Image: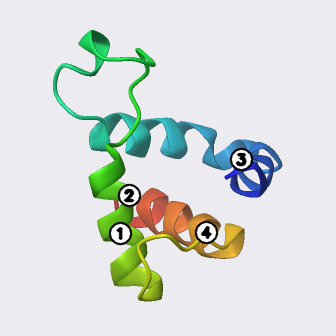
Amino acid sequence: MFRVGVAVLRRPGLWGTAVRQGWRTAPHGWWRRRPFLPLPSGDYLRFRLLTQYGDGDARPDPADVIAYLEWCRQYG
């Protein structure tokens, strides 16, 4: 995930989109559970990785995440 974070940080035009998508995927009541951050649930991330790469434990490719955020910015 570090490489994904670096890839997003290098593209300031996508920062708002990344925050918005992160917020949209945060589970309800996220502030009641550690780490007290609006992060997607582990189950959701595993599902997305399974549907993208065929493996729920795969590491996301930074280029795929950037392409997704650009798509969200364009059509969202």
Element type where label 2 sits in the image: helix
**Given the image, on which type of amino acid does mark 2 rest?**
Leu
Q: Which residue is mark 4?
A: 59
Which callout, 3 or 2, points at the residue further toward the start of the chain? 3
As rendered, which of 12 and 3 lies closer to the eye?
3
Left/right placement of residue 6 relative to residue 49 reads: right
Callout 1–callout 2 Cβ contact below 8 Å: yes
Q: Which residue is mark 2?
A: 45
Reply above or below: 28 against 65.
Answer: above
Estimate how packed mark 1 is, as few (under 14), some (14 to 19) or many (20 or more) residues with alpha carbons within 10 Å.
Answer: some
Between marks 3 and 4 in the image, the one whose residue lies nearer the viewer: 4
Residues at marks 1 and 2, CA–CA distance in whole angstroms: 5 Å
What is the quadrant of the C terminus in the image?
bottom left
As rendered, which of 25 and 30 lies closer to the eye?
30
For the point 80% across and 48% down, the residue is: 6
Which callout, 3 or 4, points at the residue further toward the start of the chain? 3
Query: Percent from the top left, x then y, of residue 67?
Result: 58, 73
Between marks 3 and 2 in the image, the one whose residue lies nearer the viewer: 2
